[in-house]
Amino acid sequence: MYRTKIQVFEELPPLAWLVGFDGDTVTACLGPSVEAQQYHTRLHVFEGAWDGPFPQFDYASAENFFGSGFTCTDRQIHFSTPTHTLDRIYFARHAGSMMASNSLAYLCNRSGLRLRPGTGISARHASVIKGINDFDQVIYEDEETRLEQLAYSNASLDLKSQNLEFHRKHQPSKFSSFHEYQTYLSDTYDKILKNAADQDRKRKYHALTTISSGYDSTACAAIAAPLGCKSSITISSSRDGESDSGAEIAERLGISCKVLPRALPTNLNGFTEAEFVASGCGGDSVLAGFSEHLPGTVLSTGFNGGRIWSLDHTPSDDIKRGDASGSGLTEFRLKNDFIHAPVPFIAGTRHEDLLKIAHSPEMSAYRVGGKYDRPVPRRLVEDAGIPRSMFGQKKRAILFLLSSQERALSPKIRQEAYSIISNRAGKIRSFQEKLHELPRQLNAAVWKVGFHLSTTNLSVPYKFGKAICLLTSRIDQKYEHVLPFNMLNDAIFIFSLEKTSERYAFGEAQTKTK
């Protein structure tokens, strides 16, 4: 029989949790918004919401779960990840002990790990984009330490042997028509909102949606508005400087809209993007400016829409992705106390069905041709009463490119990364790494010239500047969102983890033993 000790730390990020195993005691350290509920003979610890009744705590068997948690029994702990691949659960085996957390930074802090660059940790961590069957479970290993990640799966840990056994998530039924899919999306989102606002919760959450002039987040807003969502957020412009605001569409949907410029605010003592890099995608730091609007919300986003709703991607029912966009929000989310609901991941393992629906005769009126053609989200939005001319006219993007023109990775982070290489890998920045940086630096300089030209009121310089921005953005696609593997990238990732882990130093806890 194992004792379970619950410790709640007010200083922790509200949605962070960590559980450790020592002798006959299981100790859980929780942020103030993490739920800890006894149900029959089981202790449920979780954050987030799912498509079922809150009082039953059946998040582990839910078809759609936007959060993470674990359930303690007499001899086992059962872990549950979200039904998307943007957040994960991490395990650390270090110096004879074992811990698990929904924050890799928290896990590294409590384990006292000193990670080394050159091991491929950044690339292995990002390998989740390969799909739920092919990603690297082990992301770091040395003589004393083994770090593992769990994505889109449940797992049972035997407390005596400390062996992990993995279990597949429950899958939704197949879809044969647009109406079936539309109904499933709407019903699922409605159930999640009701779960998130349940009166028995310690912390209640209300709906907030992203919106833009494109397909994906606009489709999310079209689903959310009839279900009681009253607010939205939008970025005013794309990374090429073109308008991408969804404010007019929000007005048509009858919801308010907070518009912010596409700018990178300052936090973390000058290391702005560290918490996003530490989670997996520094480019997501473009959303940092909305932090004051996010606490207590269920934030719907369109991440994965470009893959699941596309007409030309090979169907992938194991959620293969082209980039890691959205995965950088984990630490930002835990700190700012909001539930992330990336709507296109709902039924994301039914990609083949959705592709058949998109190509079916019933969708012919919603296929507009060209490279930017997504009939499923187009119909979702048009069915909500939005005219075709108001959205989905041109592919735009808002995320910062990790290595790009705007230098979303600050010189401060790079300097600290070089120090880690020198101190932990026994080498100074190599000539190869300098060469690796040079093309990006030249491309960034050229982009800045184009951007300044594109802000003029003169026709010829404007067009020339836009052409430069377009060309350099395409060149930079090689490095988009996830940097290719090298020692520098490991060092950037490690420094960002360690910088973010500073928020996991805490004081007195409220302790309960069960």
Image (spheres, helix red, strand yellow):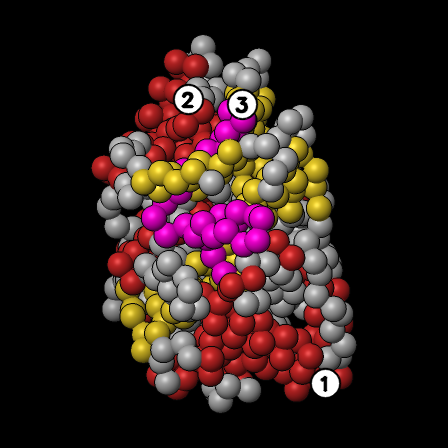
Q: Where is residue 166 shown, x and y percent of the image? A: 70, 41
Determine if the magenta segment contains residue 414. no
Q: Return the mark for residue 362.
A: 1
Q: Return the mark for residue 101.
A: none
Q: Secondary structure at mark 1?
A: helix
Q: Tell me if residue 171 comes above or below residue 401 in the rendering.
A: below
Q: Where is residue 284 shown, x and y percent of the image? A: 41, 51
**Magenta residues?**
20-49
Residue at x-position 37% and y-position 85% = 254
Q: Real-space Cα distance between discs 1 and 3?
A: 61 Å
Q: Earlier in the sequence, mark 1 or mark 3?
A: 3
Q: Main secondary structure of the magenta part?
A: strand
Marks 1, 2: nearer the viewer: 2
**Residue annotated with mark 3:** 23
- Amino acid beneath label 3: Gly
Marks 2, 3: nearer the viewer: 3
For label 2, count other residues whose C-alpha is less than 10 Å away and answer few (under 14), some (14-19) or many (20+).
few
- Amino acid beneath label 1: Glu
Q: Of all residues shown, which one is farthest toward the top? A: 426
Residue at x-position 43% and y-position 58% = 339
Kindly indicate the quadrant of the structure image that contains residue 91.
top right
**In the rendered view, does 67 fall on the left or right side of 349?**
left
For label 1, count other residues whose C-alpha is less than 10 Å away and answer few (under 14), some (14-19) or many (20+).
few
